Amino acid sequence: MDAILYEARDRVAIISLNRPEKHNAMNSAMSEAFAHAIARAQADCDVRSILLRGEGKSFCSGRDTSALGVRPEGVSDFAHVSQSQSRKFNLIDSQKPVIAALRGHAIGGGFEIALHCDMRVASETARLSLPEIDHGIITDGGGSVITAALAGASRAKYMLMTCDAVGAHQALQWGLVDFVVPDKDLDAFAFDLAAKVAARPPIHVAMAKILIDGLQGESIRRGIREELIAITALYKTEDRQEAKTAHTESRKPEFKGC
């Protein structure tokens, strides 16, 4: 079964995350396939907007926990996260607008994928969270800075520091999503929005995206680079190791601040 599905219709590239049994958690192979799908859509002259969605009950539950901290031999934490971030910048910098359709859980890196998009449509089942601290790390795809840009600093701190999930209507009130619709209407509503954008002159749409993203783009890019430094340091802490051990032993971690 393909972990990423790709379809082009009415000038919209529909990219579907397809590990529903894992709530579309990303492993390395799926991340690679996702990057190729984004590049394919960006390179296709007939595609004018991109729609991201998830098969099953969730959009994306983030990095597959079995793959957290897994590195090819000889690859440092810094190099690994740098490579991951370069793929995320490819989505952020897409000249073709990207719309996310959020159903169920959008957790950690899955929520960050949604944050990289230009617009977000949530179903009433959507639950958004940034639980990285519970895993002894921190966001590395802009979760801290983009959340703060959209919802405000104190709300970003709430999400990162408590790891609590935010429901669809709360997310709408905070500016983290742009529309909330009944679950049965999510795919049709999100596709219609992507098609509406795709029907406009593509150069004008791209220029509008560049102009608007310029308002906070550099500060967000700087923040993501700072996340690289932060997470690289946090991988070496004792609390990170305690989080890994606690997960393996199916118990609550006992953090000591070291």
Image (spheres, rainbow, N blue to C red):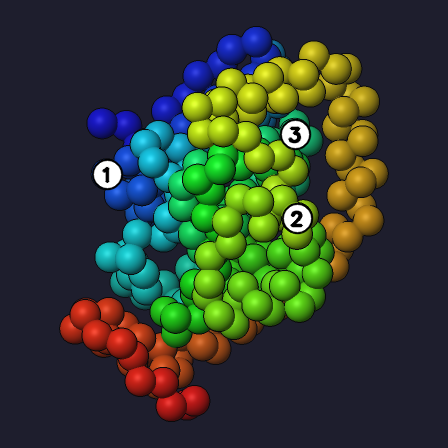
Q: Residue furthest left?
A: 249
From the image, tell me which residue sits under label 3: 97
The residue under the point 50% across, 49% down is 167
Compare residues 108 and 33 and report the one nearer the observer.
108
Q: Is residue 32 visible?
A: no
For mark 1, does the 10 Å Cα neighbourhood hold few (<14), some (14 to 19), or many (20 or more) residues? few
Q: Is residue 87 left or right of residue 210?
A: left
Question: Which three-letter amino acid code belongs to the residue tagged 3?
Answer: Pro
The residue under the point 42% across, 60% down is 80
First in residue order: circle 3 vs circle 2: 3
Q: CA distance from mark 3 to mark 1?
A: 29 Å
Task: Give the image location of residue 247, x and y in percent.
Answer: 24, 69
* For the residues bearing labels 1 and 2, Cβ distance under 8 angstroms: no
Q: Is residue 175 left or right of residue 245?
A: right
First in residue order: circle 1 vs circle 2: 1
Q: Quadrant of the N terminus?
A: top left
Q: Which mark is on residue 21? A: 1
Compare residues 173 and 257 and report the one nearer the observer.
173
Question: Which three-letter amino acid code belongs to the residue tagged 2?
Answer: Gln
For mark 3, does the 10 Å Cα neighbourhood hold few (<14), some (14 to 19), or many (20 or more) residues? many
From the image, tell me which residue sits under label 2: 173
- Position of residue 175 relative to residue 157, above or below, is above
Question: Which three-letter amino acid code belongs to the residue tagged 1?
Answer: Glu
First in residue order: circle 3 vs circle 1: 1
Closer to us: mark 3 or mark 1? 1
Closer to us: mark 1 or mark 2? 2
